[in-house]
Image (spheres, rainbow, N blue to C red):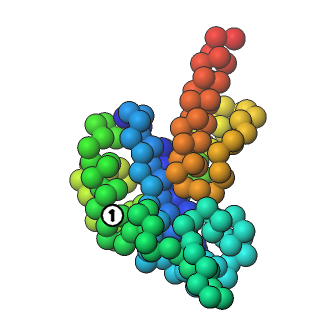
Amino acid sequence: MKVYYDCEFWENGHTIDLISIGLVAEDGREYYAVNADCDWFSIIHHAWLKENVVPYLPTKQDRHWLRLDVDNPTVKLKLDIAKEVREFLQCTPDLEMWAWYGAYDHVALCQLWGRMIDLPSGIPMWTNDIRQEFHRLGNPSKPTQDLKEHHALDDARFNMQLHKFVLDYERAQKKN
């Protein structure tokens, strides 16, 4: 069964710091969490993240500072996210992981448990890349995302739509 996912993250060329993760399984299950342990100072001082990711995170204004709302139930410790994501993925039979430009997403996912060799049993050491499928099929025009772009759960939902689109496109090409 396929699980589509997306991670929002901060990176500086040496570190990939998970901000949020969204998972959508073909059977309708969904998971979303925001990392309470992320480097909030670096995130809000990164122009692109501040403009494109922060607006979709649970935040609150605290005097002069915008803060992550740690009282929001989606904001969790990284250790808790790792446990919940492991449980979500391990109860998925014949697990296939899919993402759009998924290389960094896969590293952010793996780092929930430390090194890649520390992955829990049943979780693949790779992510299938939907973008690569578009390339393989000649780069058909991508559908427009109606959901919030750069919100990890909405992006995971859109990844499912994109994969279905590219599979339908491939079937149509084979008929012609």
Percent of width and height locating residue 55: 65, 65
- Nearest the camera: 52 or 58? 58
Q: Quadrant of the C terminus?
A: top right
Of all residues, the one furthest to the front in this rendering is 63
Percent of width and height locating residue 35: 45, 70
Residue in view at x 38 percent, y 41 percent: 29
The vertical placement of 68 against 165, above or below, is below
- Nearest the camera: 135 or 77? 77
Of all residues, the one furthest to the top in this rendering is 175
Residue in view at x 28 percent, y 65 percent: 118
**Is 126 on the left or on the right of 93, as rendered?**
right
The vertical placement of 27 against 42, above or below, is above
Of all residues, the one furthest to the right in this rendering is 141
**Is 136 on the left or on the right of 116, as rendered?**
right
The secondary structure type at the circle numbered 1 is: helix
Residue 117 is at least partly visible in this image:
no
The vertical placement of 3 against 172, above or below, is below
The vertical placement of 170 against 110, above or below, is above
Residue 27 is at least partly visible in this image:
yes
Residue in view at x 50 percent, y 73 percent: 69
Q: Quadrant of the N terminus?
A: top left
Where does label 1 land, which residue? 82
Residue in view at x 69 percent, y 64 percent: 52
Residue type highlighted by circle 1? Ala
Which image quadrant is residue 167 in?
A: top right
Q: Are there few (<14), some (14-19), or many (20+) residues within 10 Å of tag 1?
A: some
Percent of width and height locating residue 26: 42, 34
**Is 76 on the left or on the right of 157, as rendered?**
left
Of all residues, the one furthest to the bottom in this rendering is 64
